[in-house]
Amino acid sequence: MSMTVLMDLTIIVLLVAVIYYASKLNKNLMILRDSKNDMGKQIEAFNDATNRAERALPKLKKLAEDINLDLKTQMEKAQIIRDDLAFMLERADGIIDSVDSRPKSNIKQDKKAKEEKTESKINDETVVKPKTMLGALAMGADDFDGDERSEAEKELLRALRNVK
């Protein structure tokens, strides 16, 4: 074979390789162009989402401030109620201690004295006397039959003493 034929064959092989790679490059460039269009759409969607988020941010800040103010108000009210409950518990402890520390003979004497006083003031009217400590506390009275405490009253007394 001659040198020219060999050169022609080499050029043909190289041209075939160039055509193959050129077609492959063309295909990749087409994919890149399509991706560019898709990416442009995604960037626009991202831009829109960012703009919506920026517009919503002041509303969220205002809402957070309002909620914070409401929570502060509720916390202040809760603290006032907590203080009131602590005061009531202290008062209840004092009342329970004073009721429990009184000797039963004094209670019975006070009861008889009050009965006589009440009967002399009220002519023929029935006086409702509390039979339990809770009833006496509810009516604002001191006299009750301490021996007739119900189990619930005893448990309440124990619970109030343990709260201290």
Image (cartoon, rainbow, N blue to C red):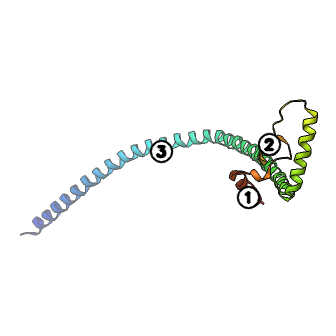
Q: Which residue is mark 2?
A: 130
Kindly state the secondary structure of the residue where label 3 is placed. helix
Rendering quarter of residue 61: top right
Residue contact at pointers 2 and 1, CB within 8 angstroms: no
Depth-wise, is mark 2 or mark 3 nearer the camera?
Answer: 2
Badge 3 amino acid: Ile
Task: Give me the disc on residue 43.
Answer: 3
Label located before the other in sequence (2 or 1): 2
Q: Nearer the viewer, residue 35 or 158?
A: 158
Task: Please give the count of numbered marks on the rendered protein.
Answer: 3
Residue sitting at x 56%, y 39%: 52
Horizontal side of residue 50 vs 143, given as left or right: left
Q: In the image, is residue 90 above or below residue 129? A: below
Q: Which residue is mark 1?
A: 158
Disc 1 residue crowd, few under 14, some 14–19, many 20+, Cα 10 Å: few
Image location of residue 100, percent across then percent down: 83, 57
Horizontal side of residue 15 vs 146, given as left or right: left
Q: From mark 3 to mark 1, how far is it between C-alphas?
A: 71 Å
